[in-house]
Image: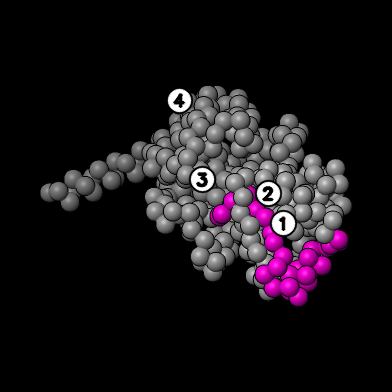
Amino acid sequence: MMKRRLAMALLVCAAALPALAADWPAKPITLIVPFPAGGSTDALARLIGQRLSEKLGQPVVVDNRAGAGGNLGTDMVAKAAPDGYTLALSTSGPLANNKYLYKNLRFDPQKDLTPVIAIGEIPMGIAVSPALKVDSLQALLERARVQPGKVSIANPGNGTIGHLTAELLKSQAKVEALGVPYKGDTPAITDTVGGNVDAVSMPITSLVPQIQAGKLKGLAVTSRQRFAGLPQVPTAIEQGIPVEATVWMAIVGPKGLPEAVVTRLNTEINAVIATPEARARLEQYGAAPIGGSPQQLVQLMASDSAKWKKVIETTNITLD
């Protein structure tokens, strides 16, 4: 009898899903941002939320739930009802990297979330002080090759994407270099400009002012294409180093989000990203637009997860 009741309940729930998707949205949608208000992710969420609200005819309310490197807010979405009324605009940390950095992560991004759409990405940058007299990424790596462990590379903190990128670079080039973690971008940049460390690895947007002012020399960006804000800086790939590393933003929902809801969201958000307003906002934060299908985001999450898993496990990086 109990099995029969359970089967009947499951059938009722399954039958309700198409109706739910057809009526969606019938009430306000919450878009969780797992980072503090005022940052680039928050600003993009508010723009997308506003334009999405206009298209869907329901308010999209941005809710900042910061904590644990973005894990807290992303976990809230993973545990929400899959009805299309709770979404997240998260980043590659919670969606790919943090699974291996935090031993006690309470959700699995590839199992507990529904990918909707990738929004944009920011490449990493490798820069040095002009006083170092190094003119290319290859030259920096050659110095590290002939002086194992002597070249120092600053990063914004243990486990950050800047840190992971430097470790990936060392692995690909087969060199030894000293990683120097700082508490944020500013002190890492200050010590590189001052010559206390040889190089720095972090999101390129943080390095733009110093490179433009001539206080740092940009050696490489780690994207497939050159960064529009610094077109004179070549990619690592151009220089024969197959390193691609970006921090990206994406919208996801809970596992089991109805396909019709995912398709509608993907279509509408692609349209928002394509507007001059959204592209200008992305450019303001140094991000290149991505967009595309949910399946493309699935592939991005999987490929980045595999790439950083290898780096993190090889170097024994942990954050808890």
Which residue bears the numbered disc 1? 197
Q: State yes or no: residue 137 in magenta.
A: yes
Which residue does the image show at 69% across and 59% down from the upper left? 153
141 or 13: nearer the viewer: 141
Which residue bears the numbered disc 4? 27
Q: Amino acid at mark 3?
A: Gly
The image quadrant of residue 80 is: top left
Q: Amino acid at mark 4?
A: Lys
Residue 188 is tagged as 2
263 versus 300 height, above or below: above
16 or 224: nearer the viewer: 224
Q: Is residue 263 visible?
A: no
Q: Secondary structure at mark 4?
A: loop
The image quadrant of residue 266 is: top right
Q: Are marks 3 and 2 in contact (CB under 8 Å)?
A: no
The numbered mark, 2 or 4, whose residue comes first in the sequence reads 4
Spatial CA span between label 2 and label 4: 46 Å
The numbered mark, 1 or 3, whose residue comes first in the sequence reads 3
Which residue does the image show at 61% across and 37% down from the upper left? 41
260 versus 60 height, above or below: below
Q: Residues within 10 Å of mark 2 (few under 14, many from 20)?
A: many
Span highlighted in magenta in the image: 133-160
Q: Amino acid at mark 2?
A: Ala
Spatial CA span between label 1 and label 3: 26 Å
The numbered mark, 3 or 2, whose residue comes first in the sequence reads 3
Which residue bears the numbered disc 3? 69
Which is closer to the viewer, label 1 or label 3?
1
- Judged left or right of residue 270, residue 306 is left
